[in-house]
Image (cartoon, rainbow, N blue to C red):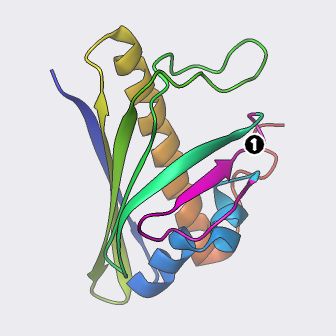
Amino acid sequence: MTLSFKIAGRIDRPVSEVFEAVVNPDTLSGYFTTGGSDGRLEPGVTVNWAFAEFPGSFPVKIDRVEKDSLIVLRWAAQESGEVSSTGEAPEPVGYDTTVTMTFEPLDGDRTLVTISEEGWRDNAGGLEASYGNCEGWTQMLCCLKAFVEHGINLRQGFYK
């Protein structure tokens, strides 16, 4: 079995505004990376995403960026899929998963955002981690919509 998922949602803003809200570290930190992002998403760079609910940061390797259209990134798989009892993020297990985000303009200055992730090992830990990441990307997409449409940060106070 291949472990992967795909989610999608529509955002009532032009594709250029939605795309910029993801690649710009200042904007991304306003609704998703609650501990910050240290760089713009550009091909060939590695940025670090931090989340207030986890100590440390997650290195994110940017493979491809096509303006207003596509972002492909890789980051370390964490097969447990669970936060440890000490509140720390799961430990990476030696391989990366690939995340693909597409941005499609729709009628009326709307944008369809699709996020997929693949590459987990076909085992119980990989299955659990894929479910956890699907939940996380779904939340990211909901937070992106609330932020760009209404200026609301849904993650503020959510974890603490």
Q: Amino acid at mark 1?
A: Phe
Disc 1: which residue: 158
Measuring 47% from the left and 21% from the top, which residue is drawn there? 93
Asked whether, in this view, residue 106 is left or right of residue 16, the answer is left
Query: In this view, which residue lies farthest toward the bottom?
Result: 108
Magenta-highlighted residues: 36-54
* Residue 108 position in % (x across, y down): 34, 90
Query: In this view, which residue lies farthest toward the left?
Result: 1
* Residue 152 position in % (x across, y down): 70, 67
Is residue 108 within the magenta segment? no
Assign the magenta stretch its main secondary structure.
Answer: loop
* Residue 32 position in % (x across, y down): 64, 55
Is residue 47 within the magenta segment? yes
Asked whether, in this view, residue 20 is left or right of residue 65, the answer is right
Q: Is residue 38 above or below residue 103?
A: above
Measuring 27% from the left and 87% from the top, which residue is drawn there? 107
In front: 131, or 60?
60
- Classify the position of the N terminus by image quarter: top left
